[in-house]
Amino acid sequence: MPRTARTVSAGIAVALTFGITACGGSGGGDVAADAKQTITVWAMGAEGEKLTDVAEKYTEANPNITVKVTPIGWDVAHQKLVSAAAAGTLPDVAQMGGSYLGEFAELGVLEPVDTKTFDKKDFFPAGWQQGEVDGQAYGVPWYVDTRVLYYRTDLAEKAGVGKAPATWPEMRDLATAYQQKAGTKWGLSIQPSGLDTVQSFYSFLYSAGGEIVDDKGEVVIDSPQAVKALKEYGAYFDKGLSNKSVQPGYDVVKDFGNGRVPMFFGGPWHVTLLNEGQPQIAGKWAVANVPADAASVSMAGGSSLVISKDSEHKAAATRFITYLTDTKGQADWYERTKDLPANTAAWTSGDLAGDANLQVFKKQMDTAKASPSLAEWTEITDKVDQAIAKVTQGKASPEDALRTAQSQIEGLVK
């Protein structure tokens, strides 16, 4: 997407103050891949803890290479990366989500992906796109996630429905039947307001054919498709099918287990949470692809692995990323973390191939849509969060709320 004349995000502004230029730097001569050396890696959250074990096994097989993993909490990850970029001390390899990549690519501190080593055809399209900025790949997909529909099959049968909803009308009909015939408190759990409400809205927006910013860099959040999606989303609150007052930190898993909430959109980690935390409903729930309007399209999430432009260990870093993202490495990573493989070949054998629930996620990933890698994306989605909240709380029509968001976002990207 065109990036000229855009406003600079707060993180970039801080880094530029320290003297980073758009062209980035160079670390000089690169150490040979098999030479004795140490490569540094930053990984976030639980991945950082798990990656330490993988790094030790890698070193056992490659004794000349020491992989030093530093786990970083997600709550401080962005600031640490910005500070390291400003100081020229980024690690050789770093984990980055799609919301970070646009910012750091614009800073010029990331090494472009070696597309002779990493073939985009080996990965889910949306996973690869998360690592691209202006058509240039800077991140290799490490793992992916998406959202699908979780629903209580036992309560659906009680409500007289024997199959998963495949369309918007079927989903709203099932939500109504859950309340009226199965006695549930709510029909569907979707977020009414607050930070990252947009993540709950994406399944509606993308399935209607809408976007926030299109592939030409144009803001299109007030399009007829987006308005249609927000009308459908808001209808659940208007009709009392969804709770318009949800507290921060709300645990949908508990209410799914006790039957207050019979449907929600969730990620792959919810499978484990339900199996381990709600054993009383084993065999009484299932997952299904996002109910369709124009199509069934969900959001794509996950993380990529990037190499610092200043790294003097690019060859060894590339080999380590290859190890993490090839078929064998991806299957091993899934067993350790339950993160969904970004490499599609890893889905053809083992637990991933035989688990019906996981195959629903794979099918959803085939059509999932990645958010644009824009430096201003957090600010952009905040405006959409505000628009959604106005509608769910009955303070504005979808047309008026999205018209306001359109104007605000145009001011951010031009």
Image (tube, rainbow, N blue to C red):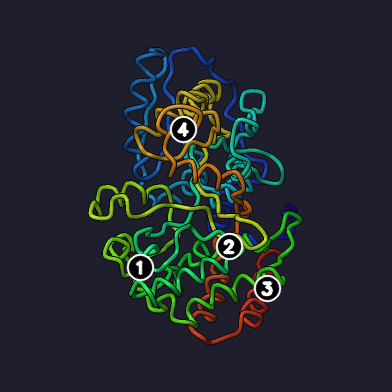
Q: Position of residue 298 (x, y in %)?
A: 56, 55
Who is closer to the viewer here, 117 or 335?
335
| Amino acid under disc 1 | Val
Identify the residue shown where x is 32% and y is 37%.
49
The reply to whether callout 3 and callout 1 are in contact (CB within 8 Å) is no
Residue contact at pointers 2 and 4, CB within 8 angstroms:
no
Mark 4 or mark 3, which is nearer to you? 4
Q: Which residue is mark 4?
A: 353
Q: Earlier in the sequence, mark 1 or mark 4?
A: 1
Q: Nearer the viewer, residue 218 or 388?
A: 388
Q: Nearer the viewer, mark 3 or mark 1?
A: 1
Dot 3 corresponds to which residue? 406
Q: Nearer the viewer's eye, disc 2 or disc 4? A: 2
Q: Compute the Cα span from label 2 to label 3.
A: 28 Å
Give the number of the mark in front: 2 or 3.
Answer: 2
Say whether marks 1 and 4 touch (CB < 8 Å). Answer: no
**Please, what is the three-letter code of the amino acid marked with disc 3?**
Gln
Q: Which residue is mark 2?
A: 167
Task: Give how far apart the Cα atoms at labels 4 and 3 are.
Answer: 42 Å
* Residue 143, horizontal then vertical, whole percent: 48, 39
- Mark 4 is surrounded, within 10 Å at the Cα level, by few (under 14), some (14 to 19) or many (20 or more) other residues, namely few
Residue 90 seen in render? no
As helix, strand or loop, the secondary structure at mark 2 comes to loop
Please report the residue visible at 27 percent of the width from the left and 55 percent of the height from the top: 281
Q: Which callout, 2 or 4, points at the residue further toward the start of the chain?
A: 2
Residue assigned mark 1: 261
What SS does tag 4 mark? Answer: helix
